[in-house]
Amino acid sequence: MEQLVREKTASRMILDGATLTPEQVYAVAHDPARSVEPAAAALRRVKASNALVKSEVEHKVVYGVTTGFGPMASHIIGRDKLRELQLNLVRSHSVGAGAPLPEAFVLAAMVGRLNTFLTGYSGVSEAVVRQLATFINHRIVPIIPEHGAVGTSGDLVQLAHIALALIGEGEVFYRGKRTKAARVLKSLDIKPLVLMPKEGLSLINGTSMMTGIAALLAVWAERLTGIAIVAGALALELVHGLSDALAETLHAARPHAGQRDIAARLRELLSQSRLLRHRHELQARVSVIEDSYVTPEQIQEIYSLRCIPQILGPVIDIVRKFRNDVTTELNSATDNPVVDVPGGTFLHGGNFHGDVIAASVDQMKIGLIKLTILAERQVNFFLNRNVNQTFPPFLNLNRPGLTLALQGVHFVATSTTAHSQSLGYPHSLHSISTNGDNQDVVSMGTDAALIAHKVVENAFIVLAVELIALAQAVDVIKAVDRIAPPSRALYLKVRAVVPPVVEDRAFSGEVNQLAETLKADGSFDFR
């Protein structure tokens, strides 16, 4: 019984409006056993904020509370219509189009929105907070169409679909089925939320959709970086790389944080390598004489091997900044107006504008494209005998010419990398004025995050191809007992999914399975 209590406590996540992390968002979005609960202190802030809204709504002009929205803000609304105003806002904006977003994205957005309310700046009632938490904990996932958000005044259209489900309208995914929200709420004896003044606006006015997706992207970006580093270490072993390219003094002479950290990680991974070479050993074999001559020894590796810290260093610097931006946004108030309880007033501004996330997600996307390019070039090195001058064509373990080995899978790495390159333009630059020109500079943050997710998926595919190639190279030179322990562990993970390619076979499913396995494997995460 005591163990069961501990397990239940461990699966419950306390949200306080201040300390939510991307990992916590990821955990709730991917683990049905995870539940959320508002912290008591945060609920007190919510109640205080809501009390100010109630006390001021009777005699003050407050945007979106006693007025219309956007260009209709000059329209003052009568007291008897304030609830209807909020209902109309939610219904009128629940007009998204296209395929439903993945359930994990929607859950992430809901967790982010709940945490935003717990900062105490939104003015919503405790009932809104409890309803959101109930939906998350029961895994009642509102159906949000892909298209509709421009990311200024927040993700209005997409968040409106969450609000619509909370009031018992629209559709949801529940237990793997698409169904009416009203039907699910009735079956669970959950009462539909009744919107009070400002609550419809608070539910849809903010960056929680783009930020929720970005939180998941932050976790995957760190995972991709970690995989690329371990893959790079194994690649260096397989070519008998020279250790001075990773020397601490070398990287201290150019002390960018990411570069130094990745070099340090590579030194750690390769500390027990029996295949890495050292410069003094090379010097002993290569003498300087008066006449020129060609040595068979490799003096320096190509850039995709020698410059791993210099290439991935800027990537991890970008990923770290991205994590910080996302974490700050998860714990921020992104409403308008913001309810200032100590000042007893409403602050009208633009905290709903998504440019901080949109710009950061675009930069992160570009970093991951560079990571993907690096991985594809490493694939090319090992499959192209004209370049490596060591391994059989396409790492053939059988009869080159008759069997083609990994020739076909290189096309996958090449085409997938090219696809990501075509997605590299920063989507946050695609600002188009809308909303009667009230929203004249927009962020496009959610679409930027969705495009970045495609780049993430592509990166996992290309890294899966690279790991298949590296594992095959290990088998070609029969080095499984000579590579460093971390490299051996990586080899075994690959081989658990993809056996060696000896006789030609169709292994598309194995490539996809390995990519999905890597995407879900938190043991690679690198910060």
Image (cartoon, grey):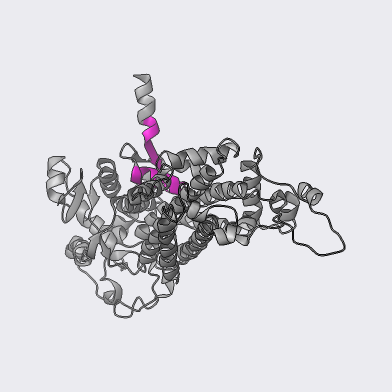
Determine the residue positioned at 35% across, 75% down.
439
Determine the residue positioned at 71% across, 54% down.
297
Question: Residue 310, percent across and down?
Answer: 63, 59
Query: In the depicted view, which residue is nearer to us: 396 or 131?
Result: 396
Q: Is residue 240 magenta?
A: no
Question: Residue 200, percent across and down?
Answer: 25, 59
Query: In the depicted view, which residue is nearer to us: 308 or 200?
Result: 308
Determine the residue positioned at 51% across, 62% down.
373
Residue 65, visible in the rendered structure: no
Residue 157, visible in the rendered structure: yes
Residue span colored magenta: 9-30
Which image quarter: residue 79?
Answer: bottom left
Residue 217 left/right relative to 244:
left
Query: In the depicted view, which residue is nearer to us: 461 or 523?
Result: 461
The mark tally for this picture is 0
Which quarter of the rendering shows the N terminus?
A: top left
Q: Residue furthest right?
A: 290
Name above or below for residue 69 compared with residue 125.
Answer: below
Residue 292 left/right relative to 400:
right
Q: Is residue 28 magenta?
A: yes
Residue 341 left/right relative to 278:
left
Question: Residue 520, percent across and down?
Answer: 40, 44
Which image quarter: residue 138?
Answer: top left
Question: Residue 237, percent across and down?
Answer: 61, 46
Name above or below for residue 70 compared with residue 100.
Answer: below
Query: In the depicted view, which residue is nearer to us: 358 or 308?
Result: 308
